[in-house]
Image (cartoon, grey):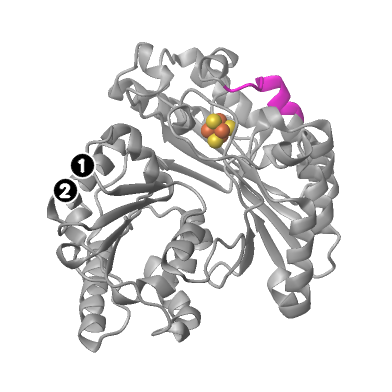
């Protein structure tokens, strides 16, 4: 998928080859679990800058990105990598840490000199630094997924106690409704076919607009997008926080028959555990919201995640979770294990053992199997990251070879250093 993505951007971005040059640079990119937002919004816009990359030892600038704590806490790993890069760089070379990886600044505590941290708007900041006309794009047509991805808001104002938001800073920032309309009108004029499917994406889309309008405005955004004839389908595959679905937002979610996909994460069916993990909704509220959408917008596919292995979790909680799943009837369920990190507020509670959480997972599946009154389209279980597959490893090697080839031919060597992937 990532290779295909690189190939696709190559087609439309590399026409500019030769236009921009940084004396030397190096990009480290952690490819195992890419952050879709960082790739589409910022990274793909940076491609003209990455035309003349060289190994770390020769680079004047070292651009560093990492998906960081997207699913797991990687701050130690990132700090270690940055220290290693700092030790290998040539004298005077500047390290520029981009995106979520900029949170490593706290870990490093000033231990590396000549290093810059840019957590947001980094394509724009790089553009200014190197005199290149680039900046973030929040409306990007994804040729592979065949949807127009829109990022109307970034960040989240909550701090659920299992979430990286407790220790990561991501600036909260919405686009204005007027700005979104202007962009959609432009796309309508130039590429109306790209508007067929809209994928609304955000860490917490329910909070859209708070910073600009002083209140949540997701409902207005849905009505705006729904009003375009060119739009046939609207997907909200991430970022709906159940507790923050206001009556107005719920009404819009039920009103727009163009909505085909929603993700609302139940996490657990135990009110006690919801409170413990800092989720602000109750199971009763979740039941009402799910069932209202099922009733008034029956074609919407609803996905949810369930988190198992939470501190103090017991069999009663598992049975409550199974009951909530049966009552709310999500179409897709993803079961995750809670992974504790010392930085999470949940770390202070007694943790349950690995065998206990596996037992809970089996018990949940068995209970659902026995009591299945609703046909789930997909039940999956994503446990701790599996080791990288042989196929993926081959892809990475091929990518490395390809880059060497590009370097020999003097064109666009995006430099991947696989040795850093598995530190
Ligand atoms: S609402 Fe979502 S993104 Fe925000 S803190 Fe909670 S889990 Fe994290």
Q: Which of 366 and 87 is in front in this view?
A: 87
Q: What is the C-alpha distance between the residues marked 1 and 2?
A: 6 Å
Q: Residue 84 carries which label?
A: 2
Identify the image quadrant of residue 401. Answer: bottom left
Identify the image quadrant of residue 83. Answer: top left
Left or right of 16 on screen, residue 352 = left
Q: Main secondary structure of the magenta part?
A: helix
Left or right of 38 on screen, residue 354 = left
For ligand 1, give the image quadrant: top right
Instruction: Give the crowd class for mark 2: few <14, some 14-19, many >=20 residues within 10 Å.
Output: few
Q: Does the residue labelled 2 lie within 8 Å of ligand 1?
A: no
Q: Which of 282 and 377 is in front in this view?
A: 282
Q: Where is residue 359 in the image (x, y as percent from the top left)?
A: 36, 24
Q: What stretch is highlighted in magenta?
A: 279-288
Residue 122 in sight in this render: yes
Residue 383 in sight in this render: no
Secondary structure of residue under mark 1: helix
Q: Which of 96 and 345 is in front in this view?
A: 96
């Amino acid at each position: 998928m990532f290779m295909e993505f690189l190939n696709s951007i190559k087609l439309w971005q590399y026409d500019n080859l030769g236009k921009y040059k940084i004396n030397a640079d190096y990009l480290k990119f952690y490819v195992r679990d890419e952050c879709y937002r960082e790739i589409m919004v910022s990274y793909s816009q940076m491609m003209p800058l990455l035309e003349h990359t060289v190994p770390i030892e020769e680079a004047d600038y070292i651009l560093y990105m990492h998906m960081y704590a997207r699913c797991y806490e990687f701050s130690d790993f990132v700090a270690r990598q940055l220290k290693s890069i700092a030790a290998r760089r040539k004298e005077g070379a500047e390290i520029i840490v981009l995106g979520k990886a900029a949170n490593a600044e706290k870990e490093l505590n000033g231990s590396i000199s000549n290093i810059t941290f840019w957590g947001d708007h980094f394509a724009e900041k790089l553009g200014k630094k190197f005199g290149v006309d680039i900046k973030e794009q929040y409306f990007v047509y994804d040729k592979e997924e065949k949807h127009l991805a829109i990022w109307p808001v970034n960040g989240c104002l909550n701090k659920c106690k299992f979430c990286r938001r407790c220790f990561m800073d991501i600036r909260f920032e919405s686009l204005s409704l007027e700005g979104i309309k202007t962009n959609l009108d432009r796309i309508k004029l130039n590429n109306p076919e790209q508007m067929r499917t809209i994928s609304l994406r955000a860490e917490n889309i329910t909070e859209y607009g708070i910073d600009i309008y002083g209140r949540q405005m997701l409902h207005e955004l849905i009505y705006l997008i729904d009003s375009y004839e060119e739009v046939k389908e609207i997907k909200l595959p991430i970022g709906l926080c159940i507790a923050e679905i206001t009556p107005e937002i719920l009404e819009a979610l039920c009103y727009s028959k163009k909505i085909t996909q929603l993700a609302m994460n139940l996490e657990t069916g135990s009110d006690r555990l919801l409170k413990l993990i800092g989720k602000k909704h109750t199971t009763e509220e979740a039941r009402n919201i799910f069932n209202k959408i099922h009733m008034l917008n029956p074609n919407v596919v609803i996905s949810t995640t369930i988190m198992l292995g939470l501190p103090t979790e017991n069999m009663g909680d598992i049975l409550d979770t199974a009951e909530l799943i049966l009552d709310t009837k999500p179409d897709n369920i993803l079961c995750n294990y809670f992974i504790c990190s010392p930085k999470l507020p949940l770390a202070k509670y007694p943790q349950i053992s690995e065998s206990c959480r596996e037992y809970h997972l089996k018990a949940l599946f068995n209970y659902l199997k026995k009591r299945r009154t609703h046909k789930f389209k997909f039940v999956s279980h994503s446990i701790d990251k599996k080791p990288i597959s042989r196929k993926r490893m081959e892809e990475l090697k091929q990518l490395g070879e390809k880059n060497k080839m590009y370097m020999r031919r003097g064109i666009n060597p995006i430099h991947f250093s696989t040795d850093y992937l598995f530190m």
